Image (cartoon, rainbow, N blue to C red):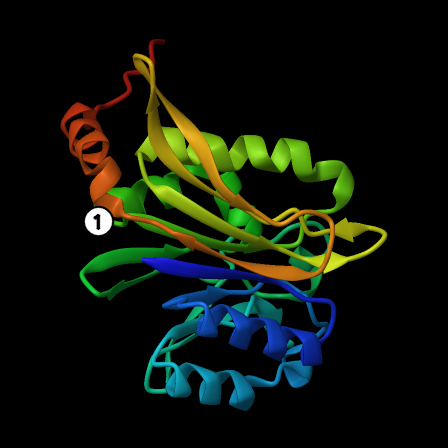
Amino acid sequence: MKIGIVQPLNTTNALYLTEESLKSGAEIVLLPEKWIRTLDDLPLHNFQQLAKKYTAYIIPGAIEDGVSIISPLIDPNGEIKAIAKKIHLFGDEKNRLLSGSSAIIFKYRGIKIGIAICYDVDFPEIVREMFLRGVEILLVPSKIPKDGIDLWREYLKVRVLENRIALVNANAFSPPEYLGMSIAYIPSLRGRFIEAKPIGELGDKEGQIVIDINPLSYMSFRIERLKEYKQFDIKELE
């Protein structure tokens, strides 16, 4: 599965970079969280046209719509197949917006894919539930400032290791505070242990990259982890 990560500075460049990813064979293209201010600024129709032209999925980021933070899922017919909503709001978002109440999973070319928006990744139960429902690739639009990137990447790697899934992150680029640094990981064997291996990265500049993920390469790790997972109760002593 070829997935494009787009790290744009403005709408003109976002459309150009998205099409460049699609021309390079991307079957899914992911943009960051809040790379534009509001839903009114999102050139949604243009993204729909690109999805239809190249028969690809496009997730044009996660954007405030005045009520919630939403992530439209545009299908290869150019239609909005679903709307993912951020479940865990961060900082002042809690004072202005409403949380989502469900996560989105979709299947494309036989592969199950989930969407988790930024701060949702900090909460392991969301990703674990997706894993238990068969998700193989997790798409994560985010807006993390430059001084939070190192810690953010620790969260991403841990989710990959916990669940033996691939993770693709598109992070906002709006210098000097937000420097992008988008990245993708897969679970990979290193010696006797599984690591979260980076397979593609955008640095601190505008751009796009297409990464190729083959879930068969880590299927055995996922199957083993599923076997190891146990339901349990907690007994609290008086």
Quadrant location of residue 55?
bottom left
Nearest the camera: 226 or 184? Answer: 184
Question: How many numbered marks, from 0 up?
Answer: 1
Which residue was labeled with disc 1?
A: 133
Q: Quadrant where the C terminus lies? A: top left
In this view, the residue farthest toward the front is 24
Pick the residue in front: 11 or 87. 11
Residue, far right: 176
The relative height of residue 176 versus residue 97 in the rendered view (above or below) is above
Dot 1 falls on a residue whose secondary structure is: loop
Check the image and report above or below for 16 versus 96. Answer: below
| Residue extending farthest top | 238
Residue 201 point in image, percent of width and height: 57, 46
Residue in view at x 38 percent, y 73 percent: 57
Question: Which quadrant of the figure contains the N terminus?
Answer: bottom left
Task: Determine the residue positioned at 36% across, 68% down.
Answer: 27
Amino acid bearing label 1? Arg
Is residue 217 found left or right of 151 in the rendered image? Answer: left
Q: Which residue is drawn at 58% across and 61% down?
A: 208
Within 10 Å of disc 1 (Cα), the crowding (few <14, some 14-19, many 20+) is: few
221 above or below 80?
A: above
Q: Residue at x 37, y 43 (%)?
A: 166
Question: Could you tell whether 49 is left or right of 65 in the image?
Answer: left
Residue 70: x %, y % from top left = 53, 69
Q: Where is residue 89 in the image (x, y as percent from the top left)?
A: 59, 54
Asked whether residue 65 is in view, the answer is no
Residue 76 visible: yes
In the picture provided, is 9 more to the left or to the right than 123?
A: right
